[in-house]
Amino acid sequence: MRLSTRIALAVGVVVPLLVLASGWVMVRLVAHDVHTGADKHLRERAAAVGTDARNLLRAMANDRPASVEQARRRRLFSAALDVGIRVVGPAGTVSGGPQPDASVPLPPPAEAARPVTMAAGGQSWRVLAVPVTLVRPATSGTLWLFSADTAGQAQIRQVRRRVISVALLTAPVAGAAAWLAASRLALPLRRLQRSASGIDPRVSAARLEHTPTRVTEVDELAGTLRTVLARYDEQAARTAEALATARSFSAAASHELRTPLMSMRINLDVLDGSPEPDAAERAEIIADLRAEHARALGLLVMLRALAQGDLVEADAFGPVDLGELLDTAVADLRRAHPHVRVTVTAAPGAIVHGWPTGLRSAVDNLLANAAIHGVGPDGTARIDVRLGPGDDPATVRLTIDDHGPGIPPAARPAVFRRFHRSPASPGSGLGLTLVAQQMALHGGTVSIEEPPAGRGAPGPAGTRFTVVLPRTATGAPLPGRRDWLTAGPEPAAG
């Protein structure tokens, strides 16, 4: 059922009910006004005939001659005009004028001290009882005044009939008017419905176009639909990115794992072949298997970390204490590489807005890279780590120096590319790509330079990796397209 029809039915029912309710109030007010006028007239007549009623009661009590009593009656009835009179005393009852039959029981005088309505012979009367008391002779009676309520009741019935007639007429009229008005007012909603029904995100990039109608509900609904469609587009894009990331992960894993797996297969065939290798050759083959296994495992770990960075959402970011994170990373490095000498100088208060898992992966890879490639001529890997404020007070700077052979300036941009590694490197070639990914996600930078001279350490100058991170959220959204698994970004210049 259309909204306009529902509104018409509701109005067609509610409006007559309101008319009836208002009519009921009107009938009560009319009845009150009619009774008030009749009661006022009764009280005025009661005041006008009070003296004559006492005189008549005195004549009846003193047993005056009939002529005197009749004279009193005439005066009383003349003063009463159009109101019925009945005087009830110990010596009898005298009545005259329009009133109920004497056989009709009257209400108790105390109840009729204020005008009341009584029915008699199919007719309605307003009745007022006034006590009459005499001192000489000591006697008392009751003066009854009657006013026919026929005209008032007729007026009330007429008002009631008109109210019912108006209610019956307003039902179809109000329903039709409400239907026309609702149909007119629903036009912006229908236009919005037609616009929304023509949108199919699967086959078209068209989106909801809405011109403000100044109808608050319609404009708010259009805004809500736009928000829903925008979120749908966002989720659809994220789903497509997730599928692309999964495809890239499987493609990269299958391509990069082919060589170590084939090498492991050859070594296993040699171990199981005939003649069997001697002890020295067997130990060499087992060492190769372990190296290839470590390489394959490291490759999968790095691919997984890159995939996580491709899919991370903004709500995963929060305050991160880089000092605590660096202490934990250095402790793990010392356990994994006992021969490495690490010196850490960290200033307190290095809090940044970041993704804890991603920052930990970046720091771990920078430390592992320095431990592997920072071995000096004496065979010892020494790493100097410094954490403190950057040149801009709103940033934090992390530097990691090693004492290795260093990286030529021309070769530095290539180290961040996916699967770039030197022939002698045991890594997967993804560690520094992951560092560049995290810097892009966090709005930071990573750069390569030579450590300052004169550190007092023998051998080459080595390499310095400098990471600069903002302390608070930059306000910029996360990169809309993330393809580190497929291509890998260039590092952000420091």
Image (tube, rainbow, N blue to C red):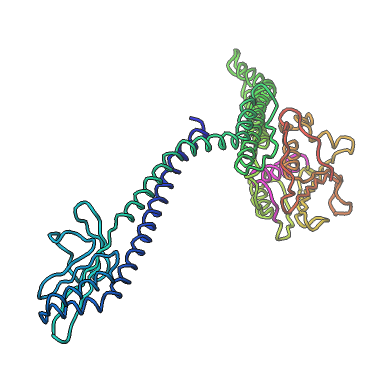
Q: Position of residue 490 (x, y in %)?
A: 81, 35
Instruction: Count the marks.
Output: 0
Magenta: main secondary structure equals helix
Q: Is residue 142 left or right of residue 33?
A: left
152 falls in the magenta region: no
In terms of depth relative to the viewer, which is nearer, 404 or 19? 19
Q: In this view, does 118 lie to the left or right of 33?
A: left
Q: Where is residue 122 in the image (x, y as percent from the top left)?
A: 21, 51
Q: In this view, does 148 lie to the left or right of 455?
A: left
In terms of depth relative to the viewer, which is nearer, 388 or 46? 46
Instruction: State whether residue 271 appears in this view.
Output: yes
365 falls in the magenta region: yes
Residue appearing at x 74%, y 57% in the figure = 345
Residue that sits furthest to the top in the current view: 274
Q: Position of residue 477 (x, y in %)?
A: 72, 42
The quadrant holding residue 230 is top right
Q: Position of residue 354 (x, y in %)?
A: 68, 48
In terms of depth relative to the viewer, which is nearer, 229 or 33? 33
The quadrant holding residue 67 is bottom left
Instruction: State whether residue 280 appears in this view.
Output: no
Residue that sits furthest to the bottom in the current view: 136
In terms of depth relative to the viewer, which is nearer, 14 or 125? 125
Report the span colored magenta.
351-373
Instruction: Say if 214 sits above or below 83 in the image.
Output: above
Residue appearing at x 27%, y 65% in the figure = 83
Instruction: Say if 242 sits above or below 49 in the image.
Output: above
The quadrant holding residue 90 is bottom left
